[in-house]
Amino acid sequence: MITGERGPHRYADDTGGPIRIGALAPLTRPGWVEAGRHLLAGLEVGVGEVNDAGGVAGRPLALVVRDTAADPRRAAAAVDELAQLGVAALVGEYHSVVARAAAERAHALGLPYLCSSAVLDALTEHPTDLIARLSPPQSRGWRIYADHLLGTGHRRIAVVTQPSVYWAAGTRVLRDHLTAYGGTVDELDSGALIPEDVCDALVDRRATALLLLVGHPQSAVSIVRAVRRDRRLAEVLIGAPAGQPEFADWVTSLGDDGAGVPFLSYLPDRLGPLGSRVGRVLGDRLGEAPSFVAFEGYDTVAVLAEVMRSHGTDRAGIAAAWPRVTVEGTRGRIRFSRVPGVGVWQWAEAPVQVVDQDPAAPLRLRVLHRD
């Protein structure tokens, strides 16, 4: 799928043809399809605005989109294909393990990659100058989430989880941070326990909070329903740091039961003029309130367009520009630096909040904790 081309008559000089940008997103299951839809919407709105303003050096941008379906091998194969198609750079992806596979392959091929939304700290196994990332590293966001738990009196934590490098890394961040303050983290295997067993385990462990470390929102729905209906667990907090409640299908599936579930959001307290305008455009395109993932998609294109305007469209020039570019994005001023423990160029000041859906008005988000 190629999107973003508007026709040659709109550009002063497009003799070189469109500038192709490879885009990865989970658009089919078992990927988190709603996240992929929001990410792609942000990318497409960004490309449309760049093209309406004349493109880059008179040439339009064109997204060459590939569906990863949350499959690392499929993503790596897509990177190979996109590189052969001559894309100037790679953007996108939501799932961290998939983004890591894409990043490793992009590094091997010399293809610059601006990762939009994946948070796993170790996006590559070694430092690289080819790759930059907009979303905050998992260690930062999940420590902030742990601070929220501590601040609200929760020290006996249970996590229901699936086998994954991403969930294991998140559990480790939570355990390291909480145990330093006298907290405990017990792991429950979602594959071995039915929802009623999860409820019994929470009672046995005297947990005051249950965190849902499972991939797709639907994987958590039956657990949430079971806990909400168990009178023994009336005071137990349900949390979802990875952001399952961010998307509309959470409310559709759970209704009032889905409110009051804290999750991490990468939006500021208040959007500025650019963010507010883009938010309206994204909302019209999506037919619902845009998630932070949609804003990450838009900001990805804003950064990449500025990089190509200032440093050229060749791959080496794009990669060399990551530490030199400064762009006003929808969620703040974006600049990249080196962050300890992260091997890629990182937007260190990306906003992080803990929010939930207000039980009194489930479509409204409440800010519970700020970085």
Image (cartoon, grey):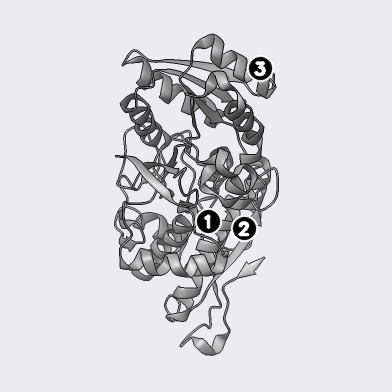
- Residue kind at label 2, given as amino acid type: Leu
Badge 1 density bin: few <14, some 14–19, many ≥20, Cα 10 Å: many
Residue on which the image places disc 2? 82
Residue on which the image places disc 1? 90
- Residue kind at label 3, given as amino acid type: Asp
Badge 2 density bin: few <14, some 14–19, many ≥20, Cα 10 Å: many
Looking at the image, which is closer to me, 247 or 73? Answer: 247
**Vertical placement of residue 192 versus 291, above or below:** above
Q: Are marks 2 and 3 in contact (CB under 8 Å)?
A: no
Looking at the image, which is closer to me, 157 or 358? Answer: 358
**Vertical placement of residue 266 versus 331, above or below:** above
- Whole-number angstrom distance, CA of label 1 to CA of label 2: 8 Å
Locate the C terminus by quadrant: top left
Badge 3 density bin: few <14, some 14–19, many ≥20, Cα 10 Å: some
Residue on which the image places disc 3? 197
Which quadrant of the figure has residue 177? Answer: top left
The reply to whether residue 25 is visible in this rendering is no
Q: Is residue 153 left or right of residue 111?
A: left
Q: Are marks 1 and 2 in contact (CB under 8 Å)?
A: yes
Looking at the image, which is closer to me, 178 or 129? Answer: 178
Number of numbered callouts drawn: 3
First reached walking from the N terminus: tag 3 or tag 1: 1
**Given the current orientation, which residue lies at the most extreme bottom position?**
9
Which secondary structure, mark 1? Answer: strand
Where residue 264 appears, as percent x and y from the top left, is 43, 40
Residue at x-position 61% and y-position 28%: 229
Q: Is residue 172 left or right of residue 6?
A: left
